Amino acid sequence: VDTALLQREQTEDAAEKARYLDVAKAQRDELKKLVDVGQEWELDLRDARIAMVEQDYRKAIALFEKLRSQGQSDNQSILLPLAEALARSGSEGMARTVYE
């Protein structure tokens, strides 16, 4: 999932971007079959990253906040995209609070 999203980010071609997003979603569905109980945060993290790509900032914020409340409050791979999602959704004040 992460590799497909990174490849999507690195390409300029719109068709390739769409293809990599589809690959990421399919891989996420496969990951769901492998994730053990208690490791659901792995899925939530991938879902949040996909939501960011799709510019569904409300969903991304909800998922990043869920991860944050589950003991990931110091994890920069959650806090930075959370702050970005907040800023893009118009909540600059909350974004600054997360950055701090």
Image (tube, rainbow, N blue to C red):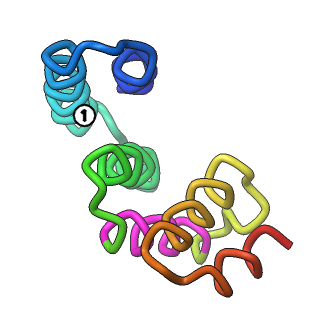
Q: Is residue 81 magenta?
A: no
**Amino acid type indicated by mark 1:** Arg
> Is 14 left or right of 89, judged from the image as shown?
left
Q: Residues within 10 Å of mark 1 (few under 14, many from 20)?
A: many
Query: Measured along the vertical axis of the image, is residue 48 above or below residue 1?
Result: below
**Residue 90 image position (x, y, % from top left):** 48, 80
Q: Position of residue 84 (x, y in %)?
A: 57, 60
Residue assigned mark 1: 28
Asked where in the image residue 16 lies, by quadrant, the reply is top left
Segment colored magenta: 59-68
Vertically, is 15 above or below 90? above
Q: Residue at x 54, y 83 (%)?
A: 91
Q: Quadrant of residue 28?
A: top left
Q: Quadrant of residue 80?
A: bottom right
Q: The residue tagged with tag 1: helix, strand or loop?
A: helix
Residue drawn 25% across and 13% down?
Answer: 13
Q: Residue at x 65, y 47 (%)?
A: 77
Question: Is the magenta region chiefly helix, strand or loop?
Answer: helix
